Structure formats: C-alpha cells, structure tokens
Amino acid sequence: MPASVRIREVGPRDGFQNEPKAIATADKVRLIELLGGTGLRRIEVTSFVRPDLVPQLADAEQVLAAARLPAGVAVSVLVPNQRGLERALRQRSRFHAVNGFVSASETHNRQNSGRSVGDSLAGLERTFARGRAETLRCEGVIATAFGCPYEGRVPIERVLAIGRRLVVMGASEVAFGDTTGMANPLQVTELFAAARAALPGVELTAHFHNTRGQGLANVLAALQCGVASFESSFGELGGCPVPVGATGNIATEDLVSMLHEMRIETGIDLGALIEAARAAQQTIGRRLGSHLLSAGPVRWSAELA
C-alpha cells in the first residue's frame, strides 16, 4: 500500500450542490477557508454549471473570487462544458485545475447532462483543449464507473475505454466515481488492477460514496491496489439524487482517521478537519453522516500509541 496519499476535498462543490437550501456565499467562503487551514492540498471549491439547473452553486464566481487559501493549496473547479470553463477563466488566477465529467452509463449520462456519452466526450475534448491552452491541469471524472441504477453493472472495458479517451484528450488524472454507492471491494480491486495496466503513468483517483456503508472498505481495496489519490467530502456531505435514500460521499475526516490509524500519511491535521466538519454541520443545521462527528477520533493511551 502507498506510504502517503493525496486527498481532494470536494465538499464545497459535490456537497453544497446537493443541499436542499442554498448556503450563503459568506458561509461557503468561511467553510472553504477552514478547510484550507487543515493541511488539505487539493480543494474543489465550486462548479460553473448553469445557475437555473443548480441554483445552490449560482454564486460560483463570487465564491472563487472571495475564498483565500494558502499558497500550497491546488484549487480546482468542475465545469460541465466549454461555456462553464469560459466563465471560470474570467478569474484564471484563482484556480489551478479543471475537472470534467462523463458517465460510464449511457442512460445515467443522458439523465444527468441530457447528452449521449459520445457527445459529452466530444464536448470534454474541446473543454480540455481550452484548459490546456491556459496551462490548467485537467482531470477526467468517470461517473457510475462501478454501477448504474438504470443499467446495472457497467462493463470494466467500457469504463477503461472512456479513461483512455480522456487521457488522449490531455487528462493528467482520471477519477473513477462510485456515484450511487454500488461498488464493493472485489469490484474495486478488479477495476483498479485493470486501470493500472490500461492507463500507465496516469494518476488514478477513487471517489466513493457511502450509500450502502461500504465506502471505507472500498478505500482499503483501492489502497491495496496501490491507489494513492482519493476524493471525499467533509461531514459526508453530498450524494446523488438517484437512488432514493442515497447518502453522501465518504467523509474526509473518516477517511483521514482511518489512513492515520494505518500509518499512511496525508499531511492533514485531523483535529482541524473535524472542526471544519463541525462548522459545516452547524451552518447547515442538521446532523451530518460523518462518524467522527459523533464518535470523535480514537484516543490511544501512551502505552498503546
């Protein structure tokens, strides 16, 4: 397993966009800056989607302009298409990377973006070309990589074919998303073993949801395949509107706690991260799904440390 891992915090985008009520811009900025003080080195701060479709992120420009983060933090934004990227580029100096997404499932992609997988990939090709021209790092995110609520299990070869296409477009990183929490550890092992062979030299990232309680088990399976890059959301914020009852992403603080217990370095201050998640819980006004917000971290005695 890797001695250290890189974690991208996606709560300010994947988490906030799924809240039924919009969070005030000032509160978003405050929470993002709290995350910036935890030692996290990668934060996805917002998404430049259509405000009428995702009103929770209608303030993307304001959030990106206002958030003040340490110099060592790589800021990324998610964009659905080139139009979204052009909006973001008005503040080019405020971010370092662009994330583009496509579903491995044709049905999910049409439900999510109103386009075929082929059309989405063609759009991403133009978007990434524009991003690279602006010296932005490009990440391709493959949603429903482990299963689709409409189509069921997604063939690994289909997922890898999309991954290869993203790399040809210029993606330095490919993230495999368990969008609706359907993955299991055996599946994770099979996919990442195949991905390591099919995508040499590419940073492979795992993005798990905790819908059925298998999120951290899937993290362990990915670690055992040598995966050293993960995406997670503080407080276990986020999720997907399909299926009904879906919970959020794995909680960043739960992930970091497990990694530290396993003596895997993250560079993150767990105590500060828990405080950021606690602040999010207070701001949102409901109990979040994070285990550490309820139980706290493990406290070893001096004899057991």
Image (tube, rainbow, N blue to C red):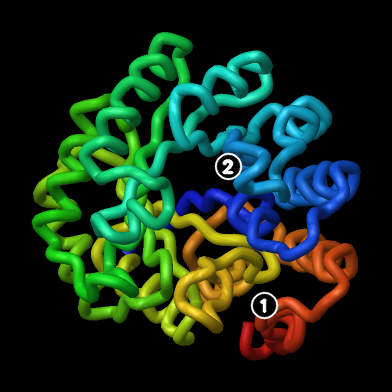
Query: Front-most of 305 and 173?
Result: 173
Residue 27 against residue 255 in the figure, above or below: above
At x 16%, y 39%, the residue is 164
Comparing labels 2 and 1, the label whose residue is closer to the camera: 1
| First in sequence: mark 2 vs mark 1 | 2
The picture places residue 245, in percent across and down from the top left corner, at 55, 83
Query: Front-most of 282 and 48?
Result: 48
At x 19%, y 66%, the residue is 154
Q: Quadrant of residue 186?
A: bottom left
Pointer 1 local density, CA inside 10 Å: few below 14, some 14–19, many at least 20: many
Q: Is residue 286 left or right of residue 241?
A: right
Q: Is residue 193 left or right of residue 54?
A: left
The amino acid on which the numbered mark 2 sits, given as a three-letter code, is: Arg
Q: Is residue 57 left or right of residue 272?
A: left
Q: Is residue 1 left or right of residue 20?
A: left
Residue 35 against residue 145 in the figure, above or below: above
Q: Residue furthest top?
A: 133
The picture places residue 12, in percent across and down from the top left corner, at 68, 50
Indicate the secondary structure of the residue bearing disc 2. strand
Q: Quadrant of residue 184?
A: bottom left
Which residue is disc 1 drawn over? Answer: 290
The picture places residue 244, in percent across and down from the top left corner, at 51, 81
Which residue is disc 2 drawn over? Answer: 42
Pointer 2 local density, CA inside 10 Å: few below 14, some 14–19, many at least 20: many
* Residue 43 in view here: no
The picture places residue 236, in percent across and down from the top left corner, at 63, 70
At x 72%, y 39%, the residue is 58
Residue 301 against residue 66 in the figure, above or below: below
Which quarter of the figure is the N terminus placed in?
bottom left
Query: Front-most of 120 and 215?
Result: 120
